[in-house]
Structures are given as C-alpha cells and as structure tokens.
Amino acid sequence: MFYKSDLPGALAKYEESLEVDKENEYAIANIGVIHLKKLDYSKCIDYSSRALSLVEGFQTETKSFSKINILEVKLLLRRAKSYEMNEKWEEAKRDLDKTIMLEPQNSEARTLLKVVQGKLDDVLFSRYREEGNEFLKVKKFQ
C-alpha cells in the first residue's frame, strides 16, 4: 500500500501490525516515514525517536557481529529532516553528525549537514551579536 502511495491504507496496516507486536521497530519506523510524507514533522520525530530507541536498545547486544546500521541511518535522516523543517537546527545537526559517524560516505547526510550548519551558524551569529549589543549598552550606561 505504501508503494502505491496509499498512505492512509499503509498507516492502517502498520498500526494493525503494532497490535500484534507493539515493539516492531520497522512498523514504527514506517509510520514515521508516512508522517514525513504527510509533512507532519512532529509525528515523524516522535515515531522516528521511538524506533531509534528500540534499535539502539538491541544494537548494543548485536554490535559484536553486525555492523549494519541501515535502519538507524534512515531513522536519523528522517528525524534530522523533520527537525530541519521545524527549525530545530541543533537537534538536526546532532542526528546528522551521528548519521555520518555511522555511514561516513552518506552524501544525503553530508549535503543536509551543510544546510543545517549554515542555518545554525546564522542563528548563533545573531544570538551572539544581540548579546554583544546588550553588553555594550550596559557598559555605556555604567
């Protein structure tokens, strides 16, 4: 249903699967991507975070024999995109940094990181400029 772009139908099926297995990281992850496609970034962040929590929980036990992080990388990218759309630059950067740590050659993550870093730099520059101006005003009147 998802590949036929029947998002409501796909969502219903994934929710049904969660009735059987409440901790199915793939169903939770796919519900997150449905919300991303529907431009509901807050719900995408919520579902991606839930799936990441599950993935991170079992990965520590299996890291010794498995270095495949495909689902984790996808989840981090989805959540980073959602953070970006909500202008949560620091959170987006954190997820992108982790994505690149897991998959250094990921061009999508590297490209998005440049955009996010630029926005974060702008925000920090503005914040520091305002703080500096306030400091100068206080000094001027002392």
Image (tube, helix red, strand yellow):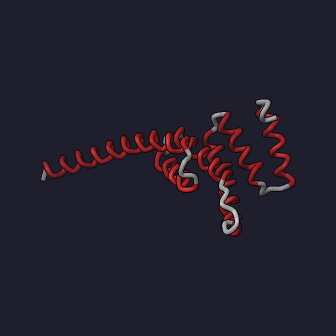
Q: Is 62 situated above or below 91?
A: below
In this rendering, position of residue 119 left or right of residue 96: left
In this rendering, position of residue 20 left or right of residue 93: right
Write the residue at 65% across / 49% down.
Answer: 48
Question: Depth check: 10 or 107 in front?
Answer: 107
Res 85 quadrant in image: top right
Res 98 quadrant in image: bottom right
In this rendering, position of residue 132 left or right of residue 46: left
Residue 127: x and y, percent?
33, 46
Write the residue at 49% across / 45% down.
Answer: 88
Residue 59: x and y, percent?
68, 63
Write the residue at 42% across / 40% down.
Answer: 119
Question: Depth check: 22 or 78 in front?
Answer: 78
Question: Depth check: 15 or 118 in front?
Answer: 118
Residue 103: x and y, percent?
57, 52
Quadrant for the N terminus, please: top right
Question: Depth check: 36 or 2 in front?
Answer: 2
Write the residue at 71% across / 38% down.
Answer: 34
Q: Count how many numbered circles sit on residues in the image.
A: 0
Residue 74: x and y, percent?
64, 47
In this rendering, position of residue 66 left or right of residue 112: right
